[in-house]
Image (cartoon, rainbow, N blue to C red):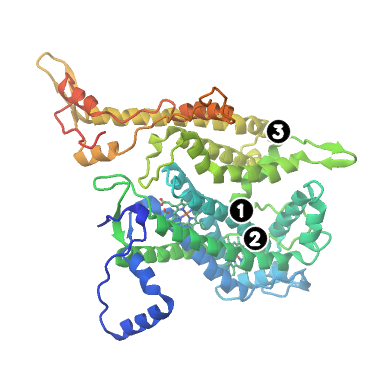
Amino acid sequence: MSVDTTKVAKTNATTAASPAKPSKLAGAATWADERLGLGGVLKKNIRKVFPDHWSFMLGEIALWSFVVLLITGVLLTLWFVPSMSEVQYQGSYDQLRGIYMSEAMVSSLNISFDIRGGLLLRQMHHWAAMLFIGSMMIHLMRVYFTGAFRKPREVNWVIGSLLLLLGTLEGFTGYSLPDDLLSGTGVRAADGFMKAAPVVGTYMSFFLFGGEFPGEAIIPRLYIIHVLLIPGLLLALIAAHMMLVVYHKHTQWPGPGRTEGNVVGYPMLPVYAAKAGGFFFIVFGATALMGGLMTINPVWKYGPYDPSKVTAGSQPDWYMGWPDGALRIIPGWESSFWGVTLSWNILLPILILPIAFWLLVMMLPFIEAWITGDKREHHLLQRPRNAPTRTALMVSFMTFYGLLWAAGGNDIIAIRFDMSINAITYFMRGAVFIGPLVAFIITRRWCISLQRHDNERLLHGYETGVVSRSAEGGFSELHLPYSEEKQYTLTARDRDEILPLASAEDANGVPAPDGRASKLRLKLRKWWYGHNVQKPTVEDFEQAHHHGDDHAVEGESSKELH
Ligand code: HEM
Ligand code: HEM
């Protein structure tokens, strides 16, 4: 383990360089350095220290699954034909031979049945897409739950939110490409959603489809968006995301020797590069295994897109499920103005809700900072229990998302559990509002009890399970103190402070222009920290250890308490 003691703010401070050995490699390096100035950049970063924790692996899974997507995607372009011209299928899949379909669908079938390793590639590409979006979401939660989005990492959070949006769009354009029944159903739904937009809707649809739906232009257009436009944007944003991780330095968990001003971990070279590089092969191997063993998107079963067939028995990829759920449970609200119908039942769940929810998630770091007034830099992570309101907020978002997602499968729930689809719809209409509220209350209380539990153990030691009987006949359980290291780690956190606001009035009693906002802010600030439990003071420790605590066994108190 190395400790990087440079101040975090001075992230790019250079260290003294050792003279390079004169060798062929050094000659080449000097040649490149003199022209590109890479030496300085490398010197700064090659020994950069990266802290270690299993949860930091989630961002890496997103990164490496993106690389797998790039590799498999580029290979797929060798055989995929993005054309809607109708041809007769003559390939080796018996059941569809002789049927007319688009060249795109024919090429997808050929990739699946006639090109050696083609099905593996398609399935690896699709599984990698699942892994990419899934790991990105779990990574988002880890960053949020541990407070890693706080100053100075807000911009990286915003970049991450853009990545999430673009990744979802990339997935949608991807599974629209093979032009099978699932693709067509999805694209047709997108056409309907667009047309629900007031005034510009029909124009947008005509613009995208190059005329009336479906036309002959949509697959080539989606293809360019899928293989060029969005991957280019993703690549640029991921590069910026990584550069910011290096620039800010990675956050770390508190522990002995770790402060807000240093980073404890392994150097980039050789340790971290080897670990991360090796991890790429694990992600690649896992995707290959899934692609090789598990069917995904069997386009041959659905057949080519046919507007007269309403259902393919197919579902969109899971990350599209939640707006679909909102669409399924919203009442059929519509209003008419001057002969124009506004379809709220589509506008709200598909256009307004996802954008509003995404904006809210993107703004979370700024909302929290506005409420708490905390302007400090944070490089030490927080345990979720030590930020009860924040943790509860994300759990309520997850509940909202999960319930809408379940509503997206209302037909499957109805069939599998032999239930009335109307009953499920009515239940979900209430549950999406009540569920998140209940989840919020339970999580917050849960976190606060966990905080109490921590304090209890810090002050009175942990239960050993050893019960002893006193001379008087009473029973008591032996408690032992935590190790000094653990005590330090548990108490290495700030006290929550409800910072005062600037006065709502000036010296002459004139109310400040944002007086109302300030009052609201103060109320929210008090609510945010609610009943949080603060870490014990030195006095608490002394009292617990020396004044009649039956359970506590003499132990060391943390010397790091403030
Ligand atoms: C974040 C990145 C990406 C995601 C999430 C993604 C997602 C998808 C998905 C879900 C499919 C449908 C696969 C299927 O038919 O089962 C697909 C198909 C395809 N993707 Fe991607 N993709 C990504 C990047 C790329 C890149 C970079 C390329 C090429 C440069 C590419 C090329 C293709 C091609 C050619 C197909 C059609 C293959 C076929 O279905 O037969 N993809 N993509
Ligand atoms: C294409 C998708 C993404 C990739 C490839 C990616 C990759 C990474 C990697 C490798 C790290 C460092 C290791 C780690 O902490 O896991 C990281 C850190 C970070 N990511 Fe992402 N990420 C992605 C999406 C997101 C999203 C959706 C968010 C949030 C909205 C986000 C916010 C952050 C933040 C704030 C950090 C710094 C965390 C810290 O220093 O503790 N990322 N990302």
Residue at image location 55% in from the left, 51% down from the top: 161
- Which amino acid type is marked by label 3? Asn
Of tags 1 and 3, which is closer to the observer?
Answer: 1
At label 2, which amino acid type do we have?
Tyr
Q: Which quadrant of the view contains residue 270? A: bottom left
Q: Which residue is mark 1?
A: 317
Secondary-structure class at tag 1: loop
Task: State the residue lying farthest toward the bottom.
Answer: 24
- In this rendering, position of residue 172 left or right of residue 137: right
Tag 2 near tag 1, CB within 8 Å: yes
* Residue placed most toward the observer, 136 or 470: 136
Residue visible at 26% across and 84% down in the picture: 22
Residue beneath disc 2: 175
Whether the residue carrying mark 1 lies under 8 Å from ligand 1 is answered with yes
Q: Residue at x 42, y 46 (%)?
A: 148
The residue carrying pointer 2 sits among few (fewer than 14), some (14 to 19) or many (20 or more) residues within 10 Å by Cα, namely many
In the image, is residue 259 above or below residue 309?
above
Between circles 2 and 3, the one closer to the viewer is 2
Q: Is residue 550 left or right of residue 344?
A: left
Is residue 399 toward the left or the right of residue 10 in the image? right
Give the crowd class for mark 3: few <14, some 14-19, many >=20 residues within 10 Å: few
Q: Position of residue 483 (x, y in %)?
A: 20, 39
Is the CB atom of the residue marked by disc 2 within 8 angstroms of ligand 1's nearest atom? yes
Looking at the rendering, in which quadrant would you find the N terminus? bottom left
Between discs 2 and 3, the one toward the N terminus: 2
The quarter of the image holding the C terminus is top left
Q: Is residue 300 in view?
A: yes
Q: Earlier in the sequence, mark 2 or mark 1?
A: 2
Relative to 424, say whether 194 is above or below: below
From what the image shows, is residue 498 above or below residue 185?
A: above
